[in-house]
Image (cartoon, grey):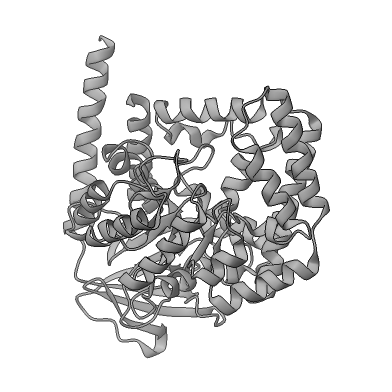
Amino acid sequence: MSSSLRRSALGFLFAIVAAALLASCSSSHPATMAITHVTLIDATGAAPQPDSTVIVSEGRISAAGSANSIVIPRSAKVVDASGKFLIPGLADMHIHLTGAGEPSGSRDFILPLLIANGITTVRDMGGKVEYLKELRAEIESGQRIGPQIFFTGPYLDGNPPSFQPSIVVQTAAEATAAVDELHSEGVDFIKVQSRLQPEAYYAIARDSKKQGIRFLGHVPDAITAAAASDAGQASIEHLTGVLLGCSRREEELRQRRLALLPLKDTEASVLARDRLWTKDLLDSYSQQKAESSFQKFRANHTWQVPTLPLLIHLAYLVPESDRKGDPRLKYIPREVREAWDKSREELLDSRTEVDFALRRRLVKQSLAVVKAMNNAGVSFMAGTDATAPNVFPGFSLHEDLFYLVEAGLTPMQALQAATTKTAEFLGRSAEQGTIEVGKRADLVLLDANPLEDIQNTESIRAVIVNGKLLDRSQLDALLANVERFAVTH
């Protein structure tokens, strides 16, 4: 068989299997389901509740409590969950759904990996509005199984922009026009990027408030994290500006960084200057400055989404954290893998052990800052930045929870960063985030207790999405479909 015929045959087989799975997920489940004899971890902070029953009707939780207190309707499909643990559906609050093809890659690659990993809500942090609306409409109509989608649309950035799709904003007037345009298109948030200048940034803050829409994203290079918090930035991604805000030499280092950005010099010279800047940043950490910043974040309700998988496996990449050879690469399409390979080579090339030692210090300091912020009462949400290089859609959210615990959060706090806290941030605490009567039936059934070991969030036995049950065999079928898609793309 020729390669073109083989590719066509695989594509046809993939379409048949995917259609059959979608049909089974969308139409065959009864209106009422009873999950019995399960240990309930409702994510409110309460202790696990053994031998519980949860009733799901028409996509909602209609009852939840001790098995002795719940009457199971005769028409209910009974799921015996003896020895299992039930948690709310998880949320990835920093993802790029169109990062691997627009939008076909999202449908056949990213969305299935999210669902197979128990992720039932996402916040897309940079993509084309028309594609994101299309995906959301397909999911909401029941045409496709997928998570709830909230999104920002294009980035607002300076010139030249860091990434695409972007709207270049250099003046207050351009900021007003951009915020008005995105608001009229129905985005949920405004995303700011690193190259914005103060005039444009503060105009975005003003006009977002005027339109009643929150702005969030990177702390621009020309703005302090404290100033961003005071301006009303709702969330800070990747700890941008946070470590710098903890330095007793903050303004000096900011000016040095800004002076470096436009320079075009030899690679060796650029690396040497960056190496010295990073060392000075780490050596100038001030606990007093840090505490002042964290108190401000708490007072201003400035949320943090550290995206620790991105920092550890991309921004601060060292040889031992390189993903090359990871068995999960079988789920990554060829074109995406090639982009990841190129990125890894660039991040490791020409670096010395001195550079890697500094990167290890950056990881250690980032984790320490997360712990200190958590102790200071700053709110966190889980997020990954998938499909950035080395960040696996779906799978990496479980890594983020693990790193949050490594940083000092309790397993319950880490779980809440992907459940109750995300619902609070989205203004949907009445709808989701915990396992309580009346809320959406977005649930994950686990084989082991995540409060004993947060990595047990990966021991997924079944996922319930808006009341639809996907058992382990169906989740495995989703993964197999993604693997087939990756071979042909």
Q: Position of residue 124 (x, y in %)?
A: 38, 54
Q: Position of residue 389 (x, y in %)?
A: 51, 37
Q: Position of residue 416 (x, y in %)?
A: 52, 71
Indicate whether 332 appears above or below 204.
Answer: above
Residue sitting at x 25%, y 71%: 59
- Of 478 and 169, which appears nearest the observer? 169
Indicate whether 280 appears above or below 450.
Answer: above
The answer to whether residue 260 is left or right of residue 61 is right
Residue sitting at x 54%, y 78%: 48
The answer to whether residue 15 is left or right of residue 291 is left
Residue sitting at x 43%, y 76%: 434
Q: Quadrant of residue 415?
A: bottom right
* Image quadrant in which the C terminus is located: top left
**How many numbered circles are shown?**
0
Indicate whether 311 appears above or below 118.
Answer: above
* Image quadrant in which the N terminus is located: top left
Q: Residue furthest bottom?
A: 69
- Of 34 and 368, which appears nearest the observer? 368
Indicate whether 94 appears above or below 21.
Answer: below
Q: Is residue 99 visible in this depiction of the protein?
A: yes
Q: Residue furthest top?
A: 2
Q: Is residue 80 visible in this depiction of the protein?
A: no
Residue sitting at x 26%, y 9%: 2
- Of 316 and 262, which appears nearest the observer? 262
Q: Position of residue 459 (x, y in %)?
A: 51, 56
